[in-house]
Amino acid sequence: MRKNINKIVGLTLCIGMLTGCAQTPESSLVKPKGSKAEDAYTEAEGVDMVKEDSSENTKDKNTAVRTTIRDLLNAPETYKSQTTDDSAKLVVNTDATVEIPDVEKISAISVTPAEVTQDLLDRITDAFFSEAKLYTSDSYYTQTKDEIKKTLDELKEDVANGNLDPYNYGTDEDGNYIYDIYGEIEMYEQEYESAPETKTLVEGRPVAGSQETENGTAENEFSGVAQMPDGTEYFYKTSSYGSDTLSVKIRKTAKSGGEKLPVDTTWSEYTSSSEGEKPTEESIGVSLDEAKKMVQEKVDEMGITDLQFSDWSYALCNNLEEDNSLSNLGSGYAIYYTRTINGVPITQTMADGGALEDMDSTMETWSYESLYFFVDKDGIESMSYSNPYTIGETKTENLNFLPFSEIMKTYEKMMVVTNADNMEYEKSRVYDIDRIVLGYARIYEPSTDPHTGLLVPVWDFFGSRKVEGDYDGNSYSDITDYPSWSFLTINAVDGSIIDRDLGY
């Protein structure tokens, strides 16, 4: 288990280095993006909402016609272009639908973290586990003397057989084993001395506010295992830590009847590079409508009324094997919820927000509001809910937007600028953008106020990216086509570039 955790941590660090710590490109397009920029969000001038209808069948020649945001921006239903850099190694193909809310105005709205109340935690707990026995993780995962002795005997047998690398960690640059089997044996021998003869399960539930732990530090966290009457088990964790004002994670760990799932079981969106065939309704064994209904029932039970279904994608359940390969365990749907305000949704992306600009930063950060589920034929397999918002006052009622044509000029320029460094190391990088979406994003100024944000309209660009290059003497090709990965985010009001991972 420790070996696989190390693999996952390594992968996460690599991804983080390529995203959250990326530097904002030097450009005249980089402008103030948080609360300091509120002066840029000006009221749009009045628009004549009466247009003449020239239809011969219309008796009244002066008919009131809605002027929508699409009309005001002179934005088309679709957009097509191609952009390249000077070397022609970077190509940005755009053949996209242009998705714009059918509204007449969009506002800039203040937002803060919602209070984490006991009522909220109880509603979530009861929605999933009203019939379950809910035990604390500390008591459930406590190893008895017999369990520790079994592990010790296996490790000592490995040593006796000359197998000093039983988990195939390999060696470091000096030829030393990365896995210290003698240190592991010493650790387990120490744990054995204080381990109980039998396991005593302790029931528990999430409690709002900070609680004192055994070592005296105050934390707002609950970690437990829920045992359902049919033998199904779920890992359940609530916490308020780091960039999360609230994080709720629920994940199935045992099937009906008690059959344990592999420790490294993970659900993720299906992409063309996923291990396993693309799911279908037939292969999943449940329709999308049925899956959405199951999820909506849970959302209703949790009493989360301010978020609505926003998007979905196919999903795969995989397990990380000993040789670092992924084995497919099943398929299902990823179902996303987001907030819609006055007809304008917060655009769903895979970014969490709340990242740090560099690894040495001590700045307090705040991640985005998020609610999503993974569902298969057996029901809800996983749920994540984090950072609920409280919607505050409207800062600007009717925002003044940049024209669509100007946004596209910025997009085509900045796709080249933001990818310039990568082209020094790659043979080619080709983007195929098929969705351009106008919606809300939350931005903030963590250096001055980490818990006050602003909902502003932004343009996001979705599609796929294919990279070809050489690494360590070997050629490689990589395709990234996660449905919710936005390759660029542009503030619709001032044209500034927003880093989705940083949140500003």
Image (spheres, rainbow, N blue to C red):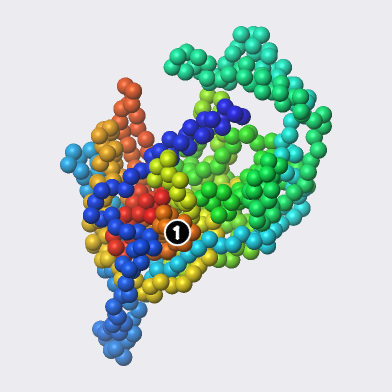
Front-lying residue, 163 or 475: 163
As displayed, is residue 62 above or below residue 339?
below
Q: Residue furthest top?
A: 161
Towards the viewer: 53 or 208: 208
Q: Is residue 429 visible?
A: yes
Relative to 238, residue 427 above or below: above
Q: Residue furthest bottom?
A: 59
* Left or right, residue 111 beside residue 155: left
Task: Give the residue furthest to the left.
Answer: 86
Q: Quadrant location of the C terminus?
A: bottom left
Tell me which residue sits at (46%, 36%) in the image.
13
Percent across and percent down for residue 192 are: 75, 24
Residue 280 seen from this side: no
Residue on which disc 1 sits: 449
Q: Quadrant of residue 294?
A: bottom right
Outermost residue on the front side: it is 216
* Residue shown at 49% from the left, 17% from the top: 171
218 or 438, which lies in front? Answer: 218
User: Which of the image's four quarters has the N terminus?
Assistant: top right
Q: Is residue 6 above or below residue 153?
A: below
The image quarter in which residue 402 lies: bottom left
Count of numbered badges drawn on the protein: 1
What kind of element bears circle 1?
strand
Q: Amino acid at mark 1?
A: Asp
Q: Position of residue 224 (x, y in %)?
A: 70, 45
Left or right: 142 as drawn, with respect to 98? right
